[in-house]
Image (cartoon, rainbow, N blue to C red):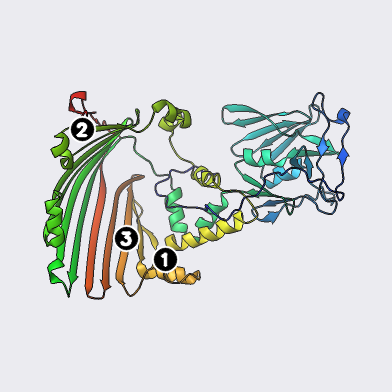
Amino acid sequence: MKKSRIVSLVMVVTTVFSTATPVFANDLVTSNYDYSVMPISEVYEDRGPILISPRPATQEIKVLLNDEEIDFTDENGNKVTPQLINDRTMVPMRKIFEVFDAEIDWDGATETVTATTEEKVLKLQINNEKAIVIEGEEIEEITLDSVPVVIDGRTLVPVRFISETLGLKVGWDEATQTVIIIDPSFVLDVIKEDAPIFYELITSDYETPKTSETKMTLNGNVNYTNAEEKSSNTNIKLALTGTSKLNQDAVSVDIDSKVTGKGILYDAIKEEGFEKVTLSAIFDMKNFAYYMKSSLLEEEIGKKWIKETLADVEEIEAVIDMEALETAEEVELEDLVNVLFDYVEIDKNTYAGTKLLTKILCQFVNDDHFTVSGRTTKTYTYEITASDINEIFKNIGIGAVLPEEVIKEAKLKFTMKFKNNMNTEASATFEGEFEYMEEKLDVNFSTKATLTSTNKTVTIKMPAEKDISKR
């Protein structure tokens, strides 16, 4: 699978479409079940017999990969049926590895199979509870719940272990005796097909600078009129400038904002002291602490900093591999998608539901809304209006979700520019016109962030202890 740096990701993939389903449920014991036990001599010492779990004699175990049943018919046309052994579904070794695009090497002398994919090597041995997983220079030994066995001359391996080791998700449907395997990468396949420009953006290998300085601006205008209560009419203009700095230890932001205008709302803003605001913030990534100083706090603590520790550092480091985070050069987009599936109970509806939701979301970022231009400097532009949003929801059978009688016009535009393989500028604009009875509201905002320095020495000075409020 291709590695890529995530430069933009607006992706929320499936939190529903699954119901609570038992995973590899306990055996059901009725008169309709067949029982068989392999002799201990054919298994391995000190572990007891292989227990082939009871199941309805007329109901075979099925294995689905992304909603398609895997056919375990061998090269001679004989169908090999998956079996429940020690409460784990066991499947024909060669077929399952072929389905997962793994190259297979069989050592008959040691009864060991080696399966090789682009990223991993798996080693399993008949009747051995220890499996070896090799990824790069890392070698891990894993204890199996159910060991590989030979039954009727065929090698069976645990499908859950194989699938999950290769990054797939596994579930079990008790009612239909079906193993459900999902390869989360299908989500990216859907995006690639339905929204190719967006897919290009989120999978392009753009560089993220280790240090940088960025200039930020925001300008906005809000104009409110009321034909019946003209005294409440207001016009406000907002102007904001700021800079941000990034190095390997910290992030800092400094902002100055100013509000001008007239009317009742402007008077209230001025009275509360929001007419001119300064804000400085520093996030100490090594110690998980942040500092903040603002003109809004000067009456209370003067020109001092507030310091807050986010949590106990040792507890955070126990959850997050800080060394890996600090040395990471790039992010696997596929891994991010995989994480989303970790919060989903995999069942027979998961694949279809996730695919449907992904296709719906793609309608918001497809090529009707995303465009790209340029070669040396590449510019991605995203545009969507309230009418577009309503049209999308109408197409999927929901109907308009934004009140057309109130929203006369609303348009969002977002632009990202890339030069020298780096995101050098991002900008966004919003224009909206709203009416309700005698009231009218016009809103316009534009913001831009421009990279002014990259991969140079950037110093972020932490506040001295004497400058921190003791409140």
- Residue type at mark 3 is Lys
**Is residue 293 visible in this depiction of the protein?**
yes
* Residue 1 rendering spot, x and y as whole percentages: 55, 44
> Which of the two labelled residues, at mark 3 and mark 1, occupies the earlier sequence position?
1
Image height check: is 275 above or below 118?
A: below
Residue 401 found in image quarter: bottom left
* Residue 461 rendering spot, x and y as whole percentages: 23, 29
Res. 75 mark: none
Q: How many marks?
A: 3
Res. 368 mark: 1
Foreground mark, 1 or 2, reads: 2
Query: How packed is label 2: few (under 14 Cα within 10 Å), some, or many (20 or more)?
Result: many
Res. 413 mark: 3
Q: Are marks 3 and 1 in contact (CB under 8 Å)?
A: no
> Which of the two labelled residues, at mark 2 and mark 3, occupies the earlier sequence position?
2
Disc 3 secondary structure class: strand
**Is residue 247 visible in this depiction of the protein?**
no
Image height check: is 65 above or below 40?
A: below
Q: Residue at x 29, y 32 (%)?
A: 308
Looking at the image, residue 321 sits to the left or right of residue 453; the answer is right
Q: Residue at x 31, y 65 (%)?
A: 411
Image height check: is 14 above or below 296?
A: below
Distance between the alpha carbons at the discs numbered 3 and 1: 13 Å
Looking at the image, residue 470 sits to the left or right of residue 13; the answer is left
Query: How packed is label 1: few (under 14 Cα within 10 Å), some, or many (20 or more)?
Result: some
* Residue 381 rendering spot, x and y as whole percentages: 35, 58
* Residue at the disc numbered 2: 305
Residue 382 found in image quarter: bottom left
Q: Are marks 1 and 2 in contact (CB under 8 Å)?
A: no
